[in-house]
Image (cartoon, rainbow, N blue to C red):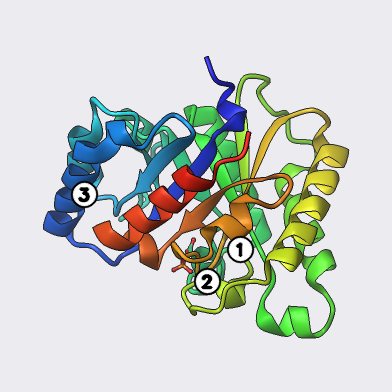
Amino acid sequence: MRDANRKIHLFANWKMYLNFDESVALARELAQQAFSFGDESSMVLFPNALSLPAVRQEVERTPIAVGAQNFYWVERAGATGEISAEMFKAAGCEYALVGHSERRHLFKETNHDVRQKLEAALRAGLIPVLCVGETHAERQEGQTKEVLEAQLRAAFTDLAWPADRQLFIAYEPVWAVGTGEACEPAAAGEMSGLINTFVRGLMGDVSLTLLYGGSVRGGNVRDYVGLPGVQGVLVGGASTKFDSWMEIVRAVKGGVRF
Ligand code: PGA
């Protein structure tokens, strides 16, 4: 069997772009194609919470997995409107996004909140996909490295990582998310190297997979998955339409180098 770590990971963050019917329809189209994607890549869909069980049902007999976009870190509580990691797990989720830039910036999630969520995802048996990245202003001020290190330190210091759990970290510069202005591949590669070294320094030999996210399209995806150490992409806008998502899938399939 191919080592799961050698695959190219294609993660589709549908955000709040698709309603229930659109989510189910796209999942159905992808499920019909799923066996043609090949085993060079793995695909995870992150639909909105209300559509998730139906999306999961559509992809159930395929290699496509589903994940939570967001959750609360307490298992059960008087926490009106929230959904726990355990509830997502019970709904068939395998993965969970943690610390996405829209959560950090639109919803003011702090590094402390992100840590709570990371721990909750681990307790619930979910595979966390931690997102880190600097804002435009932080980049302009030359603070990118410090910001990334602070986010990673808060997430991982003294965290007991389960030996059998994979860890995904997506480098997603905030200014590149949803803007059409993707990060220079060389800079993304440099930051990924830095993240890799820093996380290994904090946690030792964990099963770490690095992704890039921020305005990925069919036309640029190979620039990122071709970078040393980068094994996939987290895609928002271009993952919400069958044609643009398939462009990415095909570009990766055509360009896998093992
Ligand atoms: P984008 O979003 O592909 O629309 O830039 C990326 C993300 O939110 O993960």
Residue type at the position of mark 3: Ser
Residue position for label 3: 51
Q: Is residue 167 above or below residue 196?
A: above
Label 2 CB sits under 8 Å from any ligand 1 atom: yes
Q: In this orientation, which residue lies closer to the viewer: 160 or 75?
A: 160
- Earlier sequence position, callout 3 versus callout 2: 3
Label 1 CB sits under 8 Å from any ligand 1 atom: yes
Q: Quadrant of residue 235?
A: bottom left
Identify the secondary structure beneath mark 1. loop
| Mark 3 surroundings: few (<14), some (14-19) or many (≥20) residues within 10 A | some
Measured as percent of width and height from the top left, residue 228 is found at 74, 47
- Earlier sequence position, callout 3 versus callout 1: 3
Residue position for label 1: 172
Marks 3 and 2 sit apart, C-alpha to C-alpha, by 23 Å
Q: Is residue 7 above or below residue 254?
A: above
Identify which residue is drawn at 17% across, 43% down. Answer: 28
Identify which residue is drawn at 59% across, 22% down. Answer: 3
Q: Residue furthest top?
A: 1
Q: Is residue 69 visible?
A: no
Measured as percent of width and height from the top left, residue 82 is found at 35, 51
Q: Is residue 185 visible?
A: yes
| Mark 2 surroundings: few (<14), some (14-19) or many (≥20) residues within 10 A | many
Residue position for label 2: 177
Measured as percent of width and height from the top left, residue 86 is found at 40, 33
Q: State the mark number for residue 136.
A: none
Q: Residue furthest right?
A: 201
- Earlier sequence position, callout 2 versus callout 1: 1
Depth-wise, is mark 3 or mark 1 nearer the camera? Answer: 1
Is 148 on the left or on the right of 112, as rendered?
right
Q: Look at the numbered discs 3 and 1 and tell me whether their residues touch, using CB distance below 8 Å.
A: no
Residue type at the position of mark 2: Val
